[in-house]
Amino acid sequence: MFDFAVIGAGVVGGMVARELTKYTDSVCIIEKKGDVAMGATRANSAIVHAGFDAAEGSMKAKMNVRGSEMMEEICSLLGVKYKKNGSLVVGFNDEDEHTLVELCERGKNNGVKGVRVIHRDEILTLEPNIGDGVCVALYAPTGAIVCPYELCMASVGNAMDNGASLKLNFEVKNIEIIDGGYRIITDGDAVEARYVINCAGLYSDDIAKMVGDGSFKISPRRGEYMLLDREVGGHISHTVFRCPSKMGKGVLVSPTVDGNLLVGPTAENIEDKEDTTTTAAGLAKVRALSSEQVRGIDFSKVITSFTGLRAAGDTGDFIITMPRDRFINLAGIESPGLSSAPAIAEHVISLLIDAGYEAKARDDFNGTRRPMHFFSSLSVEEKNELIKQRPEYAHVICRCETVTEGEILDAIRTNPRPTDVDGVKRRTRASMGRCQGGFCTPYIIDLLASEMGVDYTEVTKFGGDSYINFGKTK
């Protein structure tokens, strides 16, 4: 029996698992998909919010501000890219200015540092390409950007490096209450644990019902995005939002930590928890609204579009509850969930201690991890020395993102290990460039097949039946 079972290997589940391994190595992370970071973590805005949006005193506000303060250090420890680029929430009229003044006061009351309202002349000094109709903005210098799936993989991987187990393709079908804990059941397998932490995202309400808790409902909210080539990544430097509505923070325009430009998302309540389709209408809306916020966006440089699903709860706040002994819900963790994840993990330990858990710190916990993209940061001399030791680092596989064979092999051999092409992509950025894998995919497949000891035709794009090849022609 494990001490803890964490259901859901998104960024919240990963952060919680890593925090738990500071006290025990008896942690099992359970994920229904074939890789980590496959839910809301995989496709979101990648923003570390400053904390001015959430209502004063709410769990969202508390976790957001604390999480934002923690994020830079955690990213440094885990080798994850982080950039404090600041954010602007722009307005177009007097009504927007009134809203922004209210947000500014809320931010100050929430403890956000440096937040203030500025007007067009000052906005232009920060962002020369701001939209022609923008007259006012809320400036938050503590806003930042990060790579969400990289943060998740590093958190889960660090937990595993400290002894945690990971079970993939484990869809929870039932939870039984047993003597001393819980039995979590899937087809042909089960995990027993003294404590269960429910981080199942869109399905967290279903998991809660398995132990008799029907107190909340989770609905999917679809958001469509467009990602532009690095060639236009410097068009702006801050994250530019527009005044928020009841559906969320609206369409944003933001640089990414990898040098691209991201625009989106839309916000549409839907029923299907697996519907990640993009639509012509949704992408047209993204294009129109973002062009109001930032002028001159070159949409001919779009290299891909995608959709993310947010787990919208029906309470208006994060749902962090203990409905029964040794069972914690972390549900409805929509925006600012990414920003809040480190603080939520910290808060879980407090809840456990209050409930009687003896959190004795381990002497052998190692909270650091080498960056996944370390090769590009080396000096020429360091690269040449590494290539002498490992010649595969001299072989560039992905030309668009300059990813070497050595980096791909390291990713395949590092926790949590990828088993498909998209898994390698998320870890190394190979095939994330302008050709979207047109040249490097065959080489990635070959490396995966060799490392896993399977035939070339058995390697998939994203697990399941997503086979790419049916045989070799030469």
Image: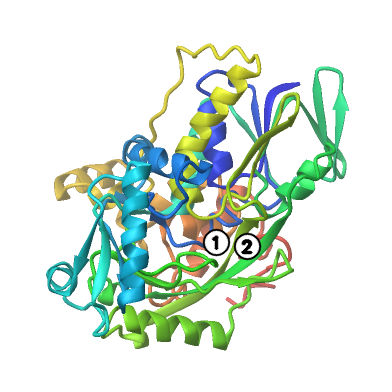
Count up the numbered dots: 2
334, above or below 1, in the image: below
316, above or below 265, in the image: above
Side of 326 relative to 377 (left or right): right
| SS label for mark 2 | loop
**Residue 4, position as x, y percentages in the image:** 67, 26
Looking at the image, which residue is at 52% across and 30% down?
347
Amino acid at the residue labelled 2: Phe
Q: Residues within 10 Å of mark 2 (few under 14, many from 20)?
A: many
Q: Which residue is mark 2?
A: 462
Looking at the image, which residue is at 46% across and 37% down?
342
**Residue 82, position as x, y percentages in the image:** 32, 49
Q: Are marks 1 and 2 in contact (CB under 8 Å)?
A: yes
Res 260 visible: no
**Residue 15, position as x, y percentages in the image:** 51, 37
Q: Which residue is mark 1?
A: 422
| SS label for mark 1 | helix
Amino acid at the residue labelled 1: Asp
424, above or below 288, in the image: above
**Residue 63, position as x, y percentages in the image:** 47, 40
